Amino acid sequence: DGDSAVRQTCRLKPDVVILDLVMPNKDGAAVTSEIRAKQSDAKILILTTFSDADGIKRALDAGANGALLKNTPNKELLDSIRKIATGKRIVSHEVSRLFIESTPPPALSPRQLEVLEAVTRGLTNTEIAAALNISNNSVKEYLSTVFAKIGAANRSEAIGIALRKHLLKI
């Protein structure tokens, strides 16, 4: 349980502590916080079956050095433990994907959504300008704003993010 995890960590002083998010008495984030307060040099890996982005984020914010799901292949798990022991931070692709999927979609104006939808149809800036009866410069400004809001570097990435976040009704 959470209380014994803190006690055992303080008593044994391990290099790496592997914690689940869900434990009796205290969750993984609370245990991580207590361990950090009592033994700051222990490295902490959250290993969980739960796809709880908020819980994992709280544990990482509390000082965990990494997070993996329990279905991580053994070789990757061992490599991650070794990397964490040397001070590296490890967050698996699956956990990163949880963070992306749990992030609420950004608020886009109706015009920004129209421009983004036109991009998904493969229209050029000139074609978008003509279709929406706006200038090329306006299209560029809308796209720049949309890219910044959704975290896209280019049109292709914007389309992928828009589809994953269900920004458009396509």
Image (cartoon, helix red, strand yellow):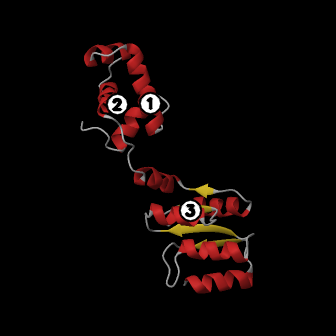
- Give residue 160's position: percent from left, percent from top: 39, 37
CB under 8 Å between callouts 3 and 1?
A: no
Q: Nearer the viewer, mark 3 or mark 1?
A: 1
Q: Which element is circle 1 on? A: helix
Q: Residues within 10 Å of mark 1 (few under 14, many from 20)?
A: some
Q: Earlier in the sequence, mark 2 or mark 3?
A: 3
Foreground pick, 131 / 154:
131
User: In which image quadrant can residue 130 be found?
Assistant: top left
* Front one among 54 and 96: 54
Distance Cα–Cα, label 2 vs label 1: 8 Å
Is residue 102 rendered to the left or right of residue 120?
Answer: right
Element carrying mark 2: helix
Cα gap from disc 2 to disc 3, whole angstroms: 36 Å
Q: Which mark is residue 67?
A: 3
Residue receiving disc 1? 145
- Residue at x 35%, y 37% (from the top left corner): 108
- CA distance separating discs 3 and 1: 33 Å
**Where 155 sits versus 151, above or below?**
above
Residue under label 2, please give it.
112
